[in-house]
Image (cartoon, helix red, strand yellow):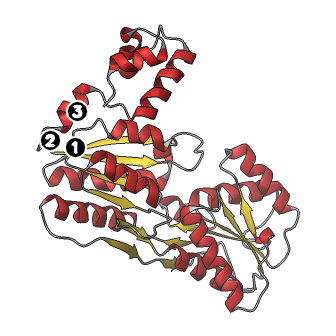
Amino acid sequence: MVTMKQLAEEAGVSITTVSNVVHGNTKRVSSSTIRRVQALMQKHNYVPRTALRALSGSGSKIIGVVAHGHKMHDTSLFGDHFYAGIVGTLEPCIRKAGYYLMLYASDDVEDIYRMAATWNVDGMIAISFSGTSYQKLCSLCNKPIVGIDMYNLSGEEYYNVGLEDEEGGYQMTRFLLQNGYTNALLFADADVGVDHHRWLGFRRAYAQMGLPCKKSNFVLLGGGGEKIRKRHYEECSRKIGRETAWFFVSDHYAVEAMRFLQERGFSIPGDVGVAGFDDAPISNLVHPALTTVHQSIENKATAAFQLLLQRLQGQEIPPRDLRLPTTLFIRNSVRRL
């Protein structure tokens, strides 16, 4: 294990400077020096000695929760209904079991590795990690870890609680097509993770109905914030026809698009049908109420913690990838043509 002194020598700075970077006291450290020291810390997988001493202890009664945010949220990751719902469900479950929750979120998975490696926790829950990232987290922390909504799983042993995302995408798309919306569009952040599987379900429904599905049916919003999303809405609104429906991978985007369309004089569902995914509380508060794919965020979080708790109690639980079902909630934002 590399020492702070070795980091200082390799970076060409003092030990005090390295110590300041390690502990976040960087007001008097230049940005270039911070980047150089952090790059070396990452290169050598440096863990502070205080963290190593904590890791060598036992029975901290702390459960770490780490979230890898793939979306460019306009505020914070936990401003999203899904992430807020997961953490809001986990906290009382963890507390009632006699543990405490420690939380960290970042778009940079390497940042999560560095942080998680310093924690003295009994176990962890990792939200929205790839299979590869999950395996690396397990090897770095050497603690029981259960994933929520992991993706790209292949050939390894995983403990994960996810959703039948492809089936949810299929169910909604088939419903739209059966109701005459033969020009359905799927709006997503990117072609990865749960968005990718919902797109696979979308395509499967088109194929089953004998209809051509083009690349233009998949609108990638790119995670660039509300202004960028509205540019996509504007472009797609020019092509709205009688058989057009917009299907979003999250209710947040669906409600945002409904407001965009209504402000420009479009009638929902008269001119265009709109559907979402998640069944967030807002979906039943907007007008018209949003047709959406329901998932139980509470069940997902609870199942993940129960699986982790069984492992913490020493039960021999075989690796598993549990997928919870989805259900259509039909409201008034779509109609039969």
Labels 2 & 3 near each other (Cβ < 8 A): no
x then y, percent, for residue 275: 63, 70
Q: Secondary structure at mark 2?
A: loop
Tell me the residue at 78%/55% (across/down): 232
Give the left or right position of residue 253, taking residue 113 as reference: right
Query: In the image, which disc is placed on residue 60?
Result: 2
Query: In the image, which disc is placed on residue 121?
Result: 1
Q: Quadrant of residue 304?
A: bottom left
Sequence-first disc among 1 and 3? 3
Q: Which is in the foreground here, disc 1 or disc 3?
A: 3
x then y, percent, for residue 104: 38, 40
Labels 1 & 2 near each other (Cβ < 8 A): yes
Q: Secondary structure at mark 1?
A: loop
Is the residue 13 above or below the residue 10 in the image? above
Q: Which residue is mark 3?
A: 52
Is the residue 28 above or below the residue 278 in the image? above
Q: Amino acid at mark 3?
A: Leu
